[in-house]
Image (spheres, rainbow, N blue to C red):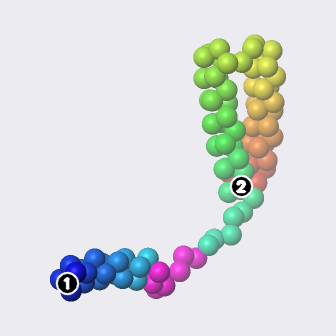
Amino acid sequence: MDLQTILPPALLTIGCFAYILWPQQKIAVQTEKTRLDYLRERKDSIYDNLRDLNFEFRAGKYPEEDYARQRESLEAEATRVVTEMEALGA
């Protein structure tokens, strides 16, 4: 093997490793989450779970008793979260 065959892939490999492992100049500043931020995320998660539950019930994956119990539980949790968000002034 000659140098013309080995050198380009070697330089490319070294360049890739340098790009990946080189320290970044800007370090992302992590902001501290407030209680309101946590509650917003929790509310979104509950609504997603309710949407998934409704879809799976319509697809026939849940018996009506289980569906009603799960839905009631998720709605009660959503009510608590929204009530606390309103108390915090959201």
Q: Residue at position x 45%, y 84% from top?
A: 22
Q: Is residue 41 left or right of residue 17?
A: right
- The quadrant in which residue 75 appears is top right
Residue 84 appears in the rendering: yes
Q: Tell me the residue that label 1 is attached to.
A: 2
Q: Tell me the residue that label 2 is attached to.
A: 38
Does 25 appear in magenta?
A: yes
22 to 57, vertically: above or below = below
Magenta span main SS: loop
Nearer to me, 48 or 78: 48
Q: Residue at position x 48%, y 85% from top?
A: 23
Does 13 appear in magenta?
A: no
Tell me the magenta residue range.
21-29
Mark 2 crowdedness (10 Å alpha carbons): few <14, some 14-19, many ≥20:
few
1 to 83, vertically: above or below = below
3 to 13, vertically: above or below = below
Whole-angstrom CA distance, mark 1 to mark 2, is 60 Å
